[in-house]
C-alpha cells in the first residue's frame, strides 16, 4: 500500500508519521487490497478548540474510493476519530458487497432529472482530476454514498458515455445523460 501523508499548517514529525502509518495499517487488515492511502492533516484557526485539527483519509481499493474527515482538539485525537470513521465505512462497504443483488434499488427506477440554473457568483478555487472507470449506475450510487457526496461523475458502462448522478431533495437519485448535438 502506498501511503501519502501531507500537512497544512502542521509539521509532520517522524513520531506523527509512524502513528499515522500504524493506524492506517490496521485499516488494511479489514480491507485487504488497499492500493493507496492519502492522509491530510490540517490545523485551522477556529474559535472552537475542539475543531482545530482536521484529519482526512482517502483510500483506494481497486477503484473503490472511501473517504472520511474528522475534527479534534489535538492532532492525534483527530486521527483516531477519522480512523474509526474509516473502519465503519469499510464494514459498511463490506456489508453492501455481501448483500449485493438482494432486494431492489432506487437506481432501477426511472430518473426524472431536475435541472436548476444559477448564475455563478464564485470563482473556481480548486480543480480535481480523477480517473473514471466504466461502471453501472448501481456501482456509481455505491461510490457516491461511500464518498459522502451529493453527486458523482462516472463513465456509464451501458452507454459508454459520461453521466452525472446526483441526490435529489426527496432522497432519490437523478441521472444526467448528456447528448451531443
Image (cartoon, helix red, strand yellow):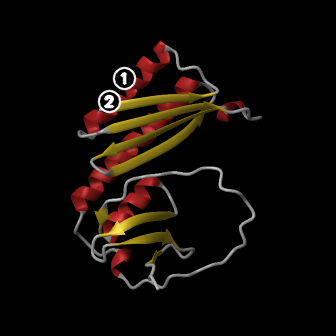
Q: Nearer the viewer, residue 137 or 118?
A: 118
Find disc 2 in the rendering and name its residue. Answer: 26
Q: Residue at x 23, y 39 (%)?
A: 32
Image height of 44 relative to 62, above or below: above
Question: In which quadrant is the N terminus drawn?
Answer: top left
Q: Is residue 179 left or right of residue 62?
A: right
Q: Residues within 10 Å of mark 1 (few under 14, many from 20)?
A: few
Residue 43: image quadrant is top right
Q: Which mark is residue 22?
A: 1
Residue contact between numbered discs 2 and 1, judged by CB atoms under 8 Å: yes
Task: Determine the residue positioned at 26% across, 33% down.
Answer: 29
Judge whether 57 appears above or below 98 on screen.
above
The spot of residue 35 in percent (x, y) is: 29, 39
Q: Which one is in front, 104 or 17?
A: 17
Task: Give 69 or 165, whichever is nearer the viewer.
Answer: 165
Horizontal and vertical percent for residue 114? 55, 81
- Residue 134, picture quadrant: bottom left
Residue at point 45% right, 53% down? 147
Secondary structure, mark 2, is helix
In the figure, is residue 127 to the left or right of 161? Answer: right
Amino acid at each position: 500500500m502506498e501511503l501519502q501523508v501531507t500537512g497544512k499548517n502542521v509539521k509532520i514529525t517522524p513520531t506523527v508519521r509512524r502513528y499515522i502509518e500504524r493506524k492506517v495499517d490496521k485499516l488494511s487488515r479489514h480491507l485487504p487490497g488497499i492500493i493507496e492511502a492519502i492522509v491530510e492533516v490540517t490545523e485551522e484557526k477556529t474559535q472552537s478548540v475542539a475543531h482545530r485539527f482536521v484529519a482526512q483519509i482517502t483510500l483506494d481499493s481497486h477503484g473503490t474510493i472511501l473517504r472520511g474527515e474528522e475534527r479534534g482538539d489535538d492532532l492525534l485525537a483527530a486521527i483516531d476519530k477519522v480512523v474509526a470513521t474509516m473502519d465503519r465505512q469499510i464494514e459498511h462497504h463490506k456489508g453492501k458487497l455481501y448483500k449485493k443483488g438482494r432486494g431492489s434499488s432506487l437506481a432501477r427506477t426511472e430518473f426524472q432529472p431536475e435541472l436548476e440554473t444559477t448564475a455563478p457568483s464564485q470563482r473556481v478555487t480548486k480543480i480535481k482530476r480523477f480517473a473514471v472507470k466504466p461502471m453501472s449506475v448501481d456501482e456509481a450510487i455505491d461510490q457516491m454514498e461511500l464518498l459522502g457526496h451529493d453527486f458523482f461523475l462516472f463513465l456509464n458502462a451501458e452507454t459508454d458515455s459520461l453521466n452525472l448522478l446526483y441526490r435529489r431533495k426527496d432522497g432519490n437519485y437523478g441521472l444526467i445523460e448528456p447528448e451531443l448535438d
